[in-house]
Amino acid sequence: MERFRLAVDIGGTNTDLFFVNEETGEELVSKVPSQSDALSAVLTGIEMAGVSVSSVRLLSHGTTVATNALIERNFPRTAMITTAGFRDVIEIGRGTKDDLWDAYKDITPPYIARRDRLVVTERIAADGEIVDALDEVEARKVASVIKKRGITAVAVCFVNSFKNPEHEKQMKRILQEELGDEVRISLSGEVLPEIFEHERFSTTIVNACVSPVIGPYIRRLDEGLKDKGYSGDLLLFHSGGGVITPVTAEKFGARLAGSGIAAGAIAAARIAENCGFKNAIGLDMGGTSTDIAMTIDGQTSVTNDWCIEFGYPIGFPALDIRTIGAGGGSLAWIDDGGSLRNGPQSAGSNPGPAAYGKGNEQPTNTDANLVLGRLGGELLGGYMTLDKSKAGQAVKSVVADHYDLSVIEAAQAIIRIANTNMAEAVRTVSIGRGYDPRDFALVAFGGAGPLHGAAIARELSIPKVIIPASPGVTSALGCLLVDLRHDLSSMILRPVHELKPDELKSAFVDLQKEGAQRLESEDVPAEKQAFEYSVDMRYLGQWRSISIPVNLEDISIDSIIAAFHAEHEREYSYRRDDAPVEMFRINVAAIGLTPPLELATHEVVEREPVAKTHRTVYFDDSPDAIETPIYQRVDLRAGDKLTGPAIIEQVDTTVVIPPETPAEVDQFNNIILTIRSE
């Protein structure tokens, strides 16, 4: 019986499934419209691939359920209990606005209303000493209020609990006594044991809000798959670039916020590495948004400063990904000043682009590409048909008539603005951080990425564009390329020169033991456990810190300081070797190694492929249509070479190769474009 590993990425528009046969390395893909019931979408996708549920040995799942719950405020009513005087910390935040130039724009409301943010008397000093004991009478009164309001999810956030969590644990015991075991309680000292109240409180609140959503979702999916014959492990992809088990996901639900977009970054890094590139920019353009991630020397950037909505940070480590509202369904519109805009509004999957014929009359990027001939009349291998006349009418009525342009000129303008928006986002994460995009390869994937990748690379002088074998489901592939991973941290606020190597090593070992316990609870044997170590450092008096990797077996304080100065110079273009350096935090990544996945390779035989048909296509460089060969991706083989203009169609995307652009298929069936410089 065949045995498959399956990755599932459920997005806002489509659900992507990527199968790998464990014996042969054969890859299968399927793509279906997302449904309100995740289980139905997964089962439909498995059926479309011609695979039985019982033959799936491992299923790794990237999901937007936590992200959507936060954006839509679709989670159970949640309460917060905090130290008296600190109930408004999450609204005061950093005292910043997402739009500095709009004095009247309000920040997004907090996840927990003020009336549900309750206080008790207690106080722990910054050194962990108990100043005021927890007032148990007040604590029980607060528990009574929560019970009367029918609230079953609570975030307990006491000041300085990162140093001494005893009061939070005491509050949890009281809540369980008064409310029973059904109440879900998140303690800030467990969720994020770090000093800054706003970040710690915010992360704990997010965790308390989404955990009740994650739990039932996972159980429905797990039980439904088992009923159909699945007997393997269900792993959940988290924002830090690893997977966790359902047990951990229910306790730390906030780790799944940003789950779906992180998988694509992991896949892009592996694909680029297979092609010989250690530096890569992942461009994941889907139906609604584009996610951009950097991989430098084989390592994808990680951040501890991110959020789903501005003002409410999540302190868990996450892959550093920039998301903008540019996708196949992004709407073209005219602003009040008469300028043409593209996104972030999206037609989504329903009603979708005008070409879907479901009632939308506003043009999208998909409509513009269809008008220009870059898209054919079908999507998803014929599962969906596109109406070119409706697409042209939408482009004409909204854009062409407004600017007195032809429909073709209007469609080209729509695409040009979309490309500029994405190129600007790439500049922000590359040039804006001291990296030259000419030193990178661009991995263009997602359902719409291969349509736009070459144009974006040309604008940024990126020399190579890699189009994966299955671009539309590449994010799903990322779910199969990672290990179990838990990220743990501990505060150490001291000048670095005061620390001794043995003292630092002891602190790391304590965190390592906690990580090992988590892995053991997930049945990961000791020989499958691995650990990575790093320190967060900053110049004394700074707010932001920089993470520096550490070799636990050979800790040198002088080497750590030297590495910090060098990284600070690269990141911020200056260094102060004579300034005191402070250690802020130590970090340990506890990793449970899963069996490695090797993608299938194919014999390379040079040849020129034969086009299946031709059609007229408008490209950026030519005002006139060009008779363009149309190839089918299934007909291409490793070693095939061709030069644009060309269009390559496949079930999950369409690849645009501009005129005079060489392309070849490598041993992994990736298409690699060589972009000529201006």
Image (cartoon, rainbow, N blue to C red):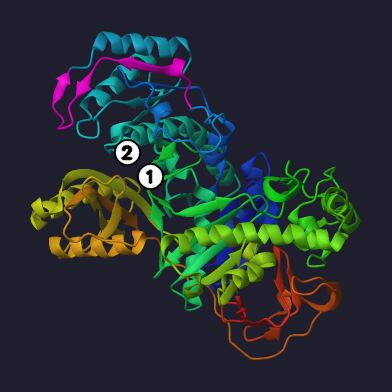
Question: For numbered disc 1, what is the local secondary structure?
Answer: loop
- Reading the image, the residue beneath label 2 is 192
Write the residue at 59% across / 73% down: 465
Q: Earlier in the sequence, mark 1 or mark 2?
A: 2
Tell me: 167 left or right of 389.
Answer: left
Quarter that holds the N terminus: bottom right
Which is more toward the observer, 25 or 668? 668
10 Å neighbourhood of mark 1: few (<14), some, or many (≥20)? Answer: many
Give the amino acid type for the residue marked by disc 1 in the picture. Phe
Write the residue at 70% across / 62% down: 652
Write the residue at 30% across / 44% down: 543
Question: For numbered disc 2, what is the local secondary structure?
Answer: loop
For residue 1, say whether it is visible. Answer: no
For residue 61, say whether it is visible. Answer: yes
The vertical placement of 467 against 51, above or below, is below
Write the residue at 88% across / 58% down: 388
- Reading the image, the residue beneath label 1 is 316
Which is more toward the observer, 549 or 232? 549
Residue 653 quadrant:
bottom right
Quarter that holds the C terminus: bottom right
Magenta stretch: residue 355 in it?
no
Label annotation for residue 293: none
Where's residue 48, x and y in %? 71, 57
Where's residue 319, x and y in %? 44, 54
Where's residue 155, x and y in %? 38, 26
Where's residue 513, x and y in %? 21, 49
Magenta stretch: residue 120 in it?
yes
Label 1 and label 2: CA atoms lie apart by 7 Å
Residue at far bottom of view: 606
Tell me: 59 left or right of 484.
Answer: right
| Stretch of the chain drawn in magenta | 111-132
Q: Are marks 1 and 2 in contact (CB under 8 Å)?
A: yes
